[in-house]
Image (cartoon, helix red, strand yellow):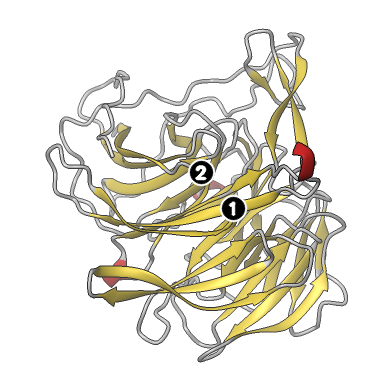
Amino acid sequence: MGWQSRTRSLQVFDTELSADSVEWCPINQWSRFLACGTYQLQKDEGKAGVESTTPSRTGRLYLFQFHSQGGFTPPLTEIQRIDTPAILDLKWCHVPVSERPVLGMATANGEIQLHTLIDAQQGSCLERVMSTELGPDRLALSMDWSTGRGESNDTRLVSSDSTGSLTVLSLGEASLNAISQWKAHDFEAWISAFSYWDTQLVYSGGDDCKLKGWDLRLGPSSPTFTCKRHSMGVCSIHSNPHREHILATGSYDENVLLWDGRNMRQPLSETAVGGGVWRLKWHPTQEHLLLAACMHNDFHILHCQQAMDGNDRPCPILASYILHNSLAYGADWSWLPLSSPPPSSPQEPAPAIVEFTETGGHLRIQYESPTASFDTSLEDDSGRYIPDYTLPPEKTAVPSPAPLPSLGESSPSVSCLLATCSFYDHMLHVWRWDWSPEETETVTGGDETEPAPS
């Protein structure tokens, strides 16, 4: 039986400031709520019009509510905006805290802030309840909760920062307390994450190109492993909440690696995605679906079943969302159930083969990292991005399309709601992906529908 993969844009929202993080609430009763964080570098002018050497970083936290009303009504409604320090990461706790959802936020002033979703007189809103500083002169770059499998015993957070340090925090009734803090990487520690199956294990990735593991029972004096398999900075890590030992990592080297945590010497698979992998998210219920935000090369959904079962070939890309016009940073799956695929949804063509040739290129400043350092990239004469490392002409940087695998007889079709955001065009997109049996022998691509205005 053939299968078809289709995406459809539902709504586009201008966040005004550069958008870099988006998170659906994972708790069933509140799964219609979506948070989006922004980051803006402000180059202040000092006395006599001289530009300050310490630019400020400002941000804004948005809260939205999703309503599936159909017709021409935009499904997403903004219900709150809060001016904050620049936001570099957002994560909802996977379980209620004091019977309410809690949103964690990593900020550019080195704070971890917690906001509770409450019912106010005018409707639901976020209220800041507690915060803690990680230390002086640092940016909080990422955070993760220990509750990824829906278990609430000993709720903790881990955060990484721009000094290369990790901090483990314990959530009390009225405070957020640091349990331990240590120097983990030589440069920025871009990402930190728990193993959701053993929350005494923590993973981290840094700009020193190293992926490391830490056992909190043994103390942070030395990592349980140090992996140099990625050739550039490691900026995304996510533990699979459905399959024990399975870990996904991504890097500026434009590769997604899958690992068995019991053997960190060799990955289960390596998939080139054509852009730096800033965020990775496993699907809430489908263990083999992985969402990747690939900076210069849009957003992709990977099918990882064969890799997890021991086939070391690259993971097939089932679908790509290509309507953003800037760096793909934030991405998340919604926990809201959707109805079966709409019959009139436009169809998305199969992922294109992207080939990089020996053509010449020139350097230009491509984007600004959260630490205000500039990164360079190659561009050809037409302005198209060329990765720093190009494969020989006979190979491709993105896996060639293969027969799309089935999700299994017990799951004949899947319909998902997703949210993604991009940086310099400061846009938030809400879209759906439908995976269903193919009704005809061939599927021809069609144009995306126009998104509803905000």
Quadrant hosting residue 101: bottom left
Left or right, 4 with respect to 221, comes to left
**Image coordinates for residue 203, horizontal then vertical, percent:** 70, 65
> Mark 1 sits on what residue?
58
Q: Earlier in the sequence, mark 1 or mark 2?
A: 2
Q: CA distance from mark 1 to mark 2?
A: 9 Å
Q: Nearer the viewer, residue 136 or 7?
A: 136
Question: Disc 1, disc 2: CB below 8 Å?
Answer: yes
Side of 314 relative to 376 (left or right): left
Label 2, secondary structure: give it.
Answer: loop
Q: Secondary structure at mark 1?
A: strand
- Residue 311 showing in the rendered view: yes
* Mark 2 surroundings within 10 Å by alpha-carbon count, few (fewer than 14), some (14 through 19), many (20 or more): many
Q: Residues within 10 Å of mark 1 (few under 14, many from 20)?
A: some
Q: Which residue lies at the image location 54% right of the left edge and 25% below the top edge?
A: 400
In the image, is 363 to the left or to the right of 352?
Answer: right
Say if 204 sits above or below 303 in the image.
Answer: below
Give the labeled residue for mark 2: 17
Front residue of 42/71: it is 42
In the rendered view of the protein, which quadrant contains the C terminus? top left
Q: In this rendering, does residue 232 appear at all?
A: no
Kind of residue at badge 2:
Leu
Q: Which mark is residue 131?
A: none
Q: Name which residue lies at 65% across and 44% down.
A: 42
**Residue 395, percent across and down?**
68, 20
